[in-house]
Amino acid sequence: MNERLARFLPCLEWARHYDREAAGKDALAALIVTLMLIPQSLAYAMLAGLPPVNGLYASILPLVAYALFGTSRTLAVGPVAVVSLMTAAALGPLFATGSAEYAGATLLLALLSGVLLLAMALLRLGFLANFLSHPVISGFISASGLLIALGQLKHILGIRIEGETAPQLLHGLYGGLPATHLPTLAIGGVSVVFLFLVRSRLSGWLQAAGFTPRLAGHLAKTGPVVALLASVLVVSLFDLASAGVRVVGAVPTGLPAFNLPPLDLALARQLLPAALLISLVGFVESVSVAQTLAAQRRQRIEPNQELVALGSANVAAALSGGFPVTGGFARSVVNFDAGAQTPLAGALTAVGIAVTVLFFTPLFHNLPQAVLAATIIVAVLSLVDLGALRRTWRYSRQDAAAMAATMLGVLLIGVEAGILLGVGLSLLLFLWRTSKPHIAVVGQLPGSEHFRNVERFAVVESPRVLSVRVDESLYFPNARYLEDRIAALVARHPQVEHLVLMCPGVNLIDASALESLKAISVRLHAAGIQLHLSEVKGPVMDRLKQSDFLDHFGGRVFISQFEALAELDPQTTLQAIALRRNGLHAIPTPRQESDSEKRP
Amino acid sequence: MNERLARFLPCLEWARHYDREAAGKDALAALIVTLMLIPQSLAYAMLAGLPPVNGLYASILPLVAYALFGTSRTLAVGPVAVVSLMTAAALGPLFATGSAEYAGATLLLALLSGVLLLAMALLRLGFLANFLSHPVISGFISASGLLIALGQLKHILGIRIEGETAPQLLHGLYGGLPATHLPTLAIGGVSVVFLFLVRSRLSGWLQAAGFTPRLAGHLAKTGPVVALLASVLVVSLFDLASAGVRVVGAVPTGLPAFNLPPLDLALARQLLPAALLISLVGFVESVSVAQTLAAQRRQRIEPNQELVALGSANVAAALSGGFPVTGGFARSVVNFDAGAQTPLAGALTAVGIAVTVLFFTPLFHNLPQAVLAATIIVAVLSLVDLGALRRTWRYSRQDAAAMAATMLGVLLIGVEAGILLGVGLSLLLFLWRTSKPHIAVVGQLPGSEHFRNVERFAVVESPRVLSVRVDESLYFPNARYLEDRIAALVARHPQVEHLVLMCPGVNLIDASALESLKAISVRLHAAGIQLHLSEVKGPVMDRLKQSDFLDHFGGRVFISQFEALAELDPQTTLQAIALRRNGLHAIPTPRQESDSEKRP
């Protein structure tokens, strides 16, 4: 088999060994995930501002695409809460919810996300996801969860309110409380309590009642579908829709039509930033779930191929009436626990949803929106982890600041603003952290050829030669700091004639740092001081040889600091080495290494 | 004297030792700089889209402010070409050039720049300038120089064209050629040639004619003022203004009124990004000039205090009818060469410009715009250094890409877009570079306690323990890569029971990397492998102790990799140490160190 093809189509690999046992396990897992996915996909479509049926559409073709291209055996792809919220946040300000333009724009957004993911795969740009540091993602998910839950409360109360941000929603809810529709509140409240109990307790109760833990677990997953069916029954029996309980209404039957999204270039450009954020957030979340599950069976995830798979899933969503999708956390864990062996479980789930769309949509006519809202609330509140902020704070104030900024941004301004704020702050703090590397003046340890920080050791300093050690690569975030520090050091040592920059910790000198070195050399020259380098690593030296720095700077590159000093100030150096070794410092001890560790 | 006050007001320091000799030198330097500054300030005001007199205003109070707060003895502050272009680019799309709104917005822009610089000083945010890597700044200046020169050609040709980008300007010039106004072209062309010759040759000719090099240099600096006076004379004599040569026209006489800029919050918010870029570019350029000059006399620049000084200068510009200013390169070098001893030279220059505004503005009525354009063109073309692109390319393709992106952005889209493109690409490439640290599987060097890269040395590997060394700090740009690599390594070594992460090169573990370590530990656990750490540096260990990682990960932290192996797989380890040392590898040789140098 062609190896490149196998890497591009991982399904070729597992399909070769597929057998009846795997098929049975996959089918069971698919059944359970289907029952879990039906209410979720209806609910997340509503969250994304779309008719519920689009959620079902988004759970058919995309799952098949992932089954073909994905490297995770157990990841369950489909609509997820956070991405649905991001979709609504991107399109809400542009089009009226429920309009044809809104639905068209959703398809375009899914297409853009898909194309961006595929482009990232092609150009090997998966590292872009590194921009989303863990505190930012974690804060983003928690705050999004809170925002989603707040936004769904209106469905539980049966009121209409406007608002995107947490303060707006709170204000709207407070103002709308008197208008609460009690039958809706009853249904919604009971659903929330029921779903919470199902999630947290049902499995235990069923085990106590004699079910095996495995079966009890599987049964508990069907809780939401039970709530859905029960509520449809109640609403139909008592004709609650006429009493003002808002229901889903007519849901079209039949598979989605195969359609191209509207190819509006101006709109595409407008949606591009949102599509990029959706792609990156979806990718990061999905890969992290997939890796956790794969590790438990010692399987492998190929991140670049995951870009292909998620990209294809989103393109498939765009072509079949869906909206942006990615790998879902809870759903994948259920799939894994239910024993899914291969991505075929995902494809079978797609069949389950297709059957639903073909035959069971009339069932959903009397489904109360409050029940869907309850499904969402119970699902997203499990994503909220406010303790993470405290834990991160204890570990690193800077990371906690980035997390808090993300959360506040999401709650007070909006999801995109929040994530951009967090990413921006992470980068700023990162640059700040790397902008001041540890730079030490070093001197010769008496009786040895070693050089150590003058502030920590009793060393011999040459009056004519200033030895400076840099404990970091030199690149643009710290290039100017080096200039400043050297200028300050030289001003404090007016009598020196040579400055030797000791570079054992320098793994890279970029063009900015090269210009800084040139500037330093020229400025030192003007002040009557010659710059030299020592202990330059091989690859760094190779690079320097390609520039004209070595030709012009006038100094020398010494193999070791000792050689430099022996050459530039032999008298002091030889005296120092002839000194009786000081017992405390004769042999390098662990403490002596610590001067390179002073950085925060 | 209060030390903090002395740091805040560096003038208190030099004023104490001021004497007659310094005063004489300062006065001479001020005279030469004034003669150089008059045509420049008129011209840069025109470039910024303002009446020429505003250039003179911008050269009075800001210079006094810098003299009070600046730490450079010789920096000459005032309007400069690049910042003037940025001003025009920021305001051109918003207001009609020449309107009162435009002038008001310029003041607001100067105020914002000044306040931002002061805020950066207060919050110690000078490191923000590190975002502007050298290739970006260099590309930005070169491309801006080209764009400015192109934009001024219309004044030389005496035609009117619209356009902001290089293609628009070229197209306009091509279309406008037939409308060239010949008298204007004659004046402009002669001026350009004259100024070029003055700049490049005059000093040499004067020396050949018997002048001392010093005097010849000083005289050559007055070339632009001579061109200015000569052109006024010619225009007046032949009444060329009536013949269609565009002149400056009536210039108001008298010092600028002390005015507050319009405090329009919405406009301020709109101008904020431009103000930030202007502040940063101005700061970077100014500090770099100041440091180069200071070094020649072994003086010191205090970058944070420079933020205060440039901030005050811009606030002063905003209050006295000016526009954004910063330290100018050519002007500062002239000031230095002319022997300026203290910032008082700058204050005396301000007096010179004030005298000009009070008494000589009627002179400028008949000054042709073509001569001002010629002044600008000759000045900015000296900033253009296209060879830098080639030199940078030879040294680093990535840095060259950032430079090229900046240049193309400036020429094809605009100055702000160009600089943002360059900064964005620099950050991307930086993250990309740091996102894949060197990670090596290591084994025990036979007959020793040392561990080396298995790909480079004949080492002994334990079948039960996988030893992995990371040669970089662990933070968000590389946290996920670590997860991927460890997952891949474990998949390739299915029989191992322990994985020891050797951390001698890890100076930092941020919150993202901590989460990655937790995820790695959990995933390894699920696969039946225990994670351990070794050779963790002190500060990193202190941090880890503040998290709950060490309580939960279940492994141990070993002092050395040897201790880890001796504990986890004593048999293999003791056998390896008992092996006869292989002659080639018995003593660490330089080549052995090179495995930590493999990164690009």
Image (cartoon, coloured by chain):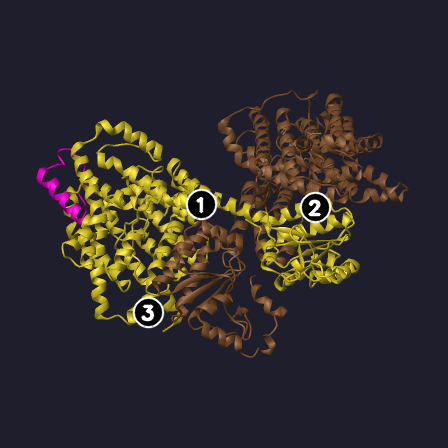
Chain colours: A yellow, B brown
Mark 2 belongs to chain = A
Specify the quadrant of the image occupied by residue B10: top right
Q: Nearer the viewer, residue B450 or B48?
A: B450
Look at label 2 and name its amino acid.
Answer: Ala
Where disc 2 sits, the SS reads helix
Q: Residues within 10 Å of mark 3 (few under 14, many from 20)?
A: few
Mark 3 belongs to chain = A
Q: Image height check: is A550 above or below A247?
A: below
Residue B17 is situated, as x and y percent measured from the top left of the image, at: 79, 32
Look at label 3 and name its amino acid.
Answer: Glu
Mark 1 belongs to chain = A
Where disc 3 sits, the SS reads helix
Q: Residues within 10 Å of mark 2 (few under 14, many from 20)?
A: many
Residue wearing tag 1: A394
Residue wearing tag 2: A487
- Kindly give the residue lying farthest to the left in the view shown: A237
Going from N to C along the chain, the mark reached first, 3 or 1, is 3
Residue range in magenta is A225-252
Look at label 1 and name its amino acid.
Answer: Arg
Image quadrant occupied by the N terminus of chain A: bottom left
Whether the residues at callouts 1 and 2 have beta carbons within 8 Å, the answer is no
Residue wearing tag 3: A13
Q: How many marks?
A: 3
